[in-house]
Amino acid sequence: MTPTAAALREGPLARLGKVFRTTAFKLSLAYLVVFALLASVGLGYVAWNARRVLDDQIVSTIEAEINGLSEQYTAGGLRRLIAVVERRAREPGASLYLVTTPAGEQIVGNVSRVPVGVLTTPGQYEGPYERGADSDRVEHRAIMRVYTLAGGFRLLVGRDTEERDRLRDAIGNTFGSSLALVLVLGVVGGWFVASRVLKRVDDMTETTRTIMAGDLDGRLRLAGTGDELDRLAQNLNLMLERIGELMHGMRQVSDNIAHDLKTPLTRLRNRADEALRSAETPEALRAAIEGIVEDSDGLIRVFNALLTIARLEAGNAPDAAARTFDAGTVVREVAELYEPLAEEQGLRLTLSAEPDLPVSGNRELVGQALANLLDNAIKYGADTITVSARRAGDAVTFHVADGGPGIPEAERARVLDRFVRLDAARSRPGFGLGLSLVNAVARLHGGSLTLADNRPGLSVLLTLPLARP
Ligand SMILES: Nc1ncnc2c1ncn2[C@@H]1O[C@H](COP(=O)(O)OP(=O)(O)OP(=O)(O)O)[C@@H](O)[C@H]1O
Ligand SMILES: [Mg+2]
């Protein structure tokens, strides 16, 4: 069963579980919980505060009434108090009154019963009570205050708390239903977001699977929204592109190596074979073996060059410790080394090097690069070869120019690749590795290599940054 078929067969329960396990869903859920907690705390505080304000109001109204009534009592005695309470108790509204004898017998008021003990302890009290005309058996609650008047009479004033409690219930109910709504919407929203994200991630997973299975040209689909998943996909696509290029390059290099080393190896073998068959004198055998050793040395040089280029391109030079050396000295040494060879070919070599050109890097590698350029100039050039080292801004420019046929503009990029030799060069010895190495050395030192037209001939510019003082 392929992964796709497995994905298709995935039941709705498994799919749901997958959605719940997504980061998007977990984050929405966490956000929801935090939001609900904060909202509860906020609303709880509001409710608590509202109740406090209402309670304060009730208590101060009660206190004002008690003060008023006790003044009436002081001014007009029990008779006046009873008259006032009787009148007020008849008024519609939430106020409660009761006047009792010192022994606790009710004299006047609209409260028929309060819990035992309330009347005998002066102070504030909140709890149940019964109204005078109560026919319904509904429980009422009130905040009440008991005050002992001069002479031992007791006065109870209170206010029903029904309204306050209704407000509290309303707040509680509203909050409860809003919270439930928010939770439902949050879970649904989280699920929606998560399943969308999941669908795209599944898509990506599917594509990567096919890529891993061998479809190296496969690319991740972009939604075109430019969001984080798109950016991720874009970068992964770039990475795939790069990997593809590298793999292509590597395949080409290994093909080239196999192809280009076959010829010298065959030659080596044929030479040995020939010697075995036809060399009759020890001298002839000796000459043949010397030829074989020479060919083998050539092969070893090629392998060394290949290894060096590979290492340089991977960014690590042999003896990578950067030292500062003078570019002029190096160019002079290399030119001196090649002067006899140039003369032998009937070429004139002119050299100019400015003093004080400090370069930081690997002296041997830079020397090798210059040697490769001079080798080419002598091999392919004509008339005069000019070599120079000059300061150009904060860089040093090595310039090697010859009067030969040059390289056509269309080929100038290609000859920097490994094993590339132009047809005109086939008659000369070489493997097509010289310029690759120069290029790798330039890049390792943060410099550049440019091929140009010398009219006639080739003009090569190798630029390396000057060492910072
Ligand atoms: N000065 C030059 N004039 C004309 N053609 C050149 C010159 N330098 C290089 N080339 C061309 O570029 C190709 C690549 O040069 P490169 O130095 O990399 O390899 P090579 O000289 O052929 O072999 P190797 O340097 O490995 O011995 C050469 O084969 C030649 O065709
Ligand atoms: Mg060369």
Image (cartoon, helix red, strand yellow):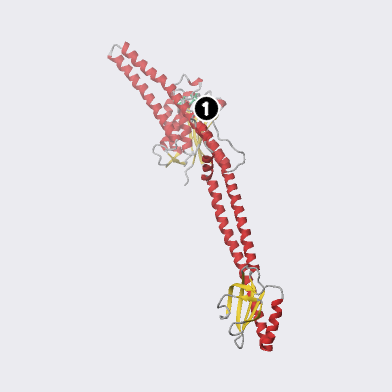
Q: Is residue 358 visible?
A: yes
The one nearer the camera, 274 or 49, is: 49
Measured as percent of width and height from the top left, residue 110 is found at: 66, 76
Name above or below for residue 220 compared with residue 36: above
Farthest front residue in view: 135
The one nearer the camera, 238 or 118, is: 118
The residue depicted at 43 percent of the width and 23 percent of the height is 258
Name above or below for residue 44 compared with residue 224: below
The residue depicted at 54 percent of the width and 28 percent of the height is 412
The residue depicted at 71 percent of the width and 76 percent of the height is 90
Q: Which residue is mark 1?
A: 414
The one nearer the camera, 360 or 257, is: 257
Q: Secondary structure at mark 1?
A: helix
- The kind of residue on which mark 1 rests is Arg
Name above or below for residue 296 compared with residue 357: above
Q: Is 79 positioned to the left or the right of 384 in the image?
A: right
Confirm or reject: label 1 Cβ below 8 Å from ligand 1: no
Measured as percent of width and height from the top left, residue 91 is found at: 72, 75
Measured as percent of width and height from the top left, residue 45 is found at: 59, 65
Q: Is residue 278 visible?
A: no
> Which picture quadrant has residue 264?
top left
Measured as percent of width and height from the top left, residue 17 is found at: 51, 43
Badge 1: residue crowd in 10 Å (few <14, some 14–19, many ≥20): some
The one nearer the camera, 393 or 36, is: 36
What is the count of numbered marks?
Answer: 1
